[in-house]
Image: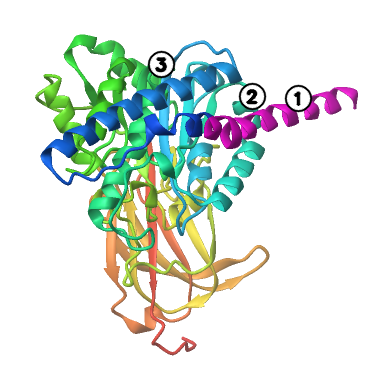
Amino acid sequence: MRCSLRCCCLCSVGLGLLWLLLSVKVCKDIEDNQNKMTVQGLPLSPQEDIYSTRRALKQLEAWNNITFRCMQKSQQRRKTWLTVGICSAPGPHRSRLLPTLLSLFHASSKKEQKHLTVVVHLVGSDRTWLGETVAQISKLFSSQILAGRLLLIHAPPEVYPATDGTPEQPSPKEHYSRQNVDHAFLLSFASKLSDYFLLLDDNVLCAHHFVSHISAKVNAIKPSTWVLLEFSNMGFLGKLFHSEDLPRLAHFLLLFHKEKPLPQLLPRFRALLDQKESQVCRPFRFFPRNTSSTASHSPSDTAFDFKRSPSGPDNPPAAVFTDMKVFDVHFPWEAYTLDESFFWTYNISTGNHLTVLLNRPVTLRRVQVLTGTIVDGRYTLKKGQVELGFDPEGMPQFCTRFILLGQLMEGQLDQEVIQKDSAYNVSCVRLVVKASQASGLMVRHVYLWEDTGGETRQI
C-alpha cells in the first residue's frame, strides 16, 4: 500500500508539472516575448511582405529557443534515435488522437521505445478540448510521459498569422496555411530531440515494429544520399527526415505557408536539398484510418479526405469470430470496422472461416470482401468463397444453413445480391478458405450494404 501511494504521488506530481508547463510556463514566456513572436502575415506591398517574412523567421527562432528551454527545465533527457511528430486539432472525431497513440506505442516494443520520442502538437484555441485531451492522454500514457517518451506542446493563437476568414468558415488557403504553421512549430521544437524525425498524422494505424523497420532501411542507405524517405504514399504521412534538416524545413514552411499545402511543399523542399527523386520504402508501415482527419486542416487535401459517402457500407451491428489463429495485434472484429483496421493471420487450412454473425436478420443488397495489402497485393486469400447464412440456433448462436454468394477473384469479392430470395433474413456472412496456404492472410474489409427499402419475409 505504501509503495502504491508513493507511485500515485509521483504520478500526480509529474502530471501536475506537465500541465503547469503547458498552461502556465510556455504561455508566460510567449507573452513576455510577444513582440518577437507575433506574425502579422499581411503582405500589403512587396516591401511589407519582406518585413513580414523576416518577422516570421524571428518568431520561429524565438519559439525554438523558448520551447527547448522549457523542455530542458522540465527534465534532463538524453537524445533518442527517432522522434515521431504529430499535429492534432479539435474536430468532429475527437477520439482519433488516442487510438493513434495507442497504436504507436503498442506497435513498438519496450526495447524500441527506449529509442523513441513522441511529440504531439495540440493546435487550436479550444481550451475545453485542450484540457480534456491533456487529461485523457495523461491518464492513459502517464508512464510514457514520466519516462520522457511523450511530450505535449501547444502554440497559443497569438503566434499565428492573421487570417481574412472567420474561424468557423476559413478558406481552403487559410486551412493549409495554418497547417503549415502548425508543423513549422512542431519541427522547430523537435529539431534537437533525436537523430531522425518521422512525420505522422493524428489518425493512423502503425504496423508492428515500425521502429526496427525504419532503422533497417536507414542503415541500408547512405545518409548523404537522401533528404526525405517515404514510408507511406498518403499525403505527408510517414515522411522521415534528418533532424538536422528540421530548422531549415520549419523556415521553409513559414516562408511559403500561403503558397501550397504541406504534401506539395515537402517534395519541393526535398528537391532544394538536391534529392531529385523520391525514395519510397516498401512495405508501407503507416495507414490512415477511415475517418475524416481535421488535423490536416485542408478540405482539398484528398490524401486524408476519408469522409464516409452516403452510398458507403452500413455494416449492421454484429459479432465476428474465426477458427484461424488470432494474435494480440490484429483481431477478427477489425475486419468488420469502417476504418482501416484489418485482421491478420497465417498458416491457414482448408475449411477455416471468418464469420460475421449479425445481431438481427437483415436484407442485403451488396457484399464486399477484400483481402491483401492495397499497394502490392500481398497476403491475399488465394482460394476462398463468401457464403450467406440463415436460421441461427444455439448458445452461442451459429447459422445452420448457408448458400454460396460467390468466389474470390484475386483475393476480392464485390457482388450485388441479385437473387432476392437470397437477400432476405441474412444472419451470417462467412468467408471460407478453400485451399491451405502457409503465408500470411490479411482480411482487410468485410463490407455489407443493407437494403432498407425491402420488406423482411420468411423463406
Judge whether 280 appears above or below 125 on screen.
above
The kind of secondary structure the magenta stretch mainly shows is helix
Q: According to the image, what is the colour scheme of the structure?
A: rainbow
Q: What crowding class fits label 3: few (fewer than 14 Cα within 10 Å), some (14-19), or many (20 or more)?
A: some
Tell me the residue at 90%/27% (across/down): 1
Along the horizontal axis of the image, is 399 left or right of 257?
right
Residue 36 horizontal/vertical position (percent): 38, 29
Residue 128 seen in render: yes
* Cβ–Cβ under 8 Å for marks 2 and 3: no
Residue 23 horizontal/vertical position (percent): 59, 37
Label 2 vs label 1: CA separation? 9 Å
Q: Secondary structure at mark 3?
A: loop
Q: Amino acid at mark 3?
A: Lys
Label 1 vs label 3: CA separation? 27 Å
Identify the residue position indicated by label 3 in the image.
192
Of the numbered discs 1 and 3, the one sitting upstream in the chain is 1
Identify the residue position indicated by label 1 in the image.
10
Of the numbered discs 2 and 1, the one sitting upstream in the chain is 1
Q: Amino acid at mark 2?
A: Leu
* Cβ–Cβ under 8 Å for marks 2 and 1: yes
Tell me the residue at 42%/58% (across/down): 338
Residue 285 seen in render: no
Question: Residue 78, labelled with which disc?
Answer: none
Magenta stretch, residue numbers: 1-28
Tell me the residue at 23%/52% (across/down): 173
Label 2 vs label 3: CA separation? 19 Å
State which quadrant residue 148 falls in.
top right
Residue 103 horizontal/vertical position (percent): 49, 38
Along the horizontal axis of the image, is 457 left or right of 373?
right
Along the horizontal axis of the image, is 338 left or right of 325?
left
Identify the residue position indicated by label 2 in the image.
146
Q: Amino acid at mark 1?
A: Leu
